[in-house]
Amino acid sequence: MLKFSRVKNPTFFIKTFGCQQNMADSQRIASFYVSRGYKMAKSIRSASEIVINTCMIRQTAEDKVTGLVKNITKIRQPAEKPKIVITGCMVGMATRDGTGKYLKDLRKRMPQVDEFLPLEEVGFDYPALRQDVTHSWVPISNGCNNFCTFCVVPFTRGREISRPLVDIIDEIKDLARRGAKEVTLLGQNVNSYGADLVKKNARGYKLPSGRIVKPVIVKHLGRFRIPTLFPYLLEEVCKIKSIKTVKFISSNPWDFSDKLIDVIAQNPKIDRNIHLAVQSGNDTVLKRMNRWYRAKEYLNLVNKIKSKIKGAQISTDIIVGFPGETEEQFQSTIKLAKSADFAYGYVSKYSSRPNTAATKALGDDVSHKEKDRRFEILDKLINHKGTIRTAVH
Ligand code: SF4
């Protein structure tokens, strides 16, 4: 439980690392602080309490946090030492790690930290404190059930929990009244939104329109899934007149159903830039990553999206140097990237993350030099078209 400040007129400053989901969380954390009588400080130098919202996606993200904590002590005089609070993914990992080892390690790495704040203490109930509503991020779910073997998210954010659909619509209606024109729906796997809500009710989930969505099992991209509410949520958001653009991030190839494609095709308000992480173009690597599709199925999905949704562009995430990735397997990814013709892609070098299956079972055997080489090739192919096509063969 976060302790109240003993300082007269306490102020806070939040430094956020990582993705848009973390940015949106920081807006709720700000509201949490304001509700406890704090005022927002203009800079890290003047705050009586500094909150660092952390990311763990790669080791470099963790290193930035430890570096900042050390720097705070340098930029502030000992007499005016602020209270330092750590929250976000690093604390999520510490609270879910039953051994207590990770928390012990955090305390050792950052003895200057006064408190560790689990995000659950903030919850979804605090309204986001937004400086500008014109474009607003709206979290629709938190956590992930997919356990890709390289990914730390299920360990830092826990299992997927969807916000009630009505709460999301009410928040967006309120934003629209305050002048919002564009919203981005956020979640680790937005297109599985509501699968947990549907599952809880055998008779189905009642949408605001009165329509019941029944929990019928469907087979999609090789796995049995229950239908999600995401297409219906998009339809409801599109009905809000003054909202002109609806974006969402991140979506995954599974759960990208025909129904979802149809809803996007029929609603011009929905952004045509679709982010669809592939991670690898090789079936063996995909299997070891616990991604549930083959490269061919992914490409078929990309083609279907492009043919049914006018103007659709696909962007992606790819990891190079996943444990055991051979040159031949890397070449399959190059082949896929050429076929998919991505608008852009976030290429990253594999980084071993604590508690993940890849770290426990697969090691980290591709050298830094080789990861760098593969990164250069793929990044240039996807993001600097025209300058590399001759270099990759
Ligand atoms: S779906 Fe995304 S967030 Fe979930 S485990 Fe896989 S990579 Fe991580």
Image (tube, grey):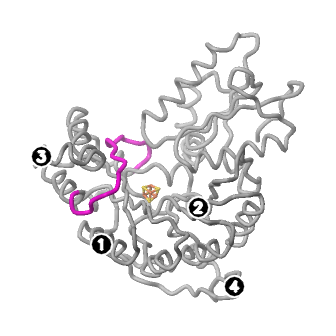
Residue 102 horizontal/vertical position (percent): 53, 37
Residue 9 horizontal/vertical position (percent): 88, 27
Q: Quadrant of residue 374?
A: top left
Mark 1 — residue?
303
Indicate the secondary structure of the residue bearing disc 1: helix
Q: CA distance from mark 3 to mark 1?
A: 25 Å
The residue positioned 21% from the left and 47% from the top of the image is: 386
* Residue type beneath disc 4: Ser
Question: Closer to us: mark 2 or mark 3?
Answer: 3
Mark 2 — residue?
185
Mark 2 surroundings: few (<14), some (14-19) or many (≥20) residues within 10 A: many
* Residue type beneath disc 1: Asn
Q: CA distance from mark 4 to mark 1?
A: 32 Å
- Residue most extreme to the left: 393
Q: Is residue 69 magenta?
A: no
- Residue span colored magenta: 338-356
Mark 4 — residue?
209
- Residue most extreme to the right: 8
Nearer-N-terminus badge (4/2)? 2
Q: Are marks 4 and 1 in contact (CB under 8 Å)?
A: no
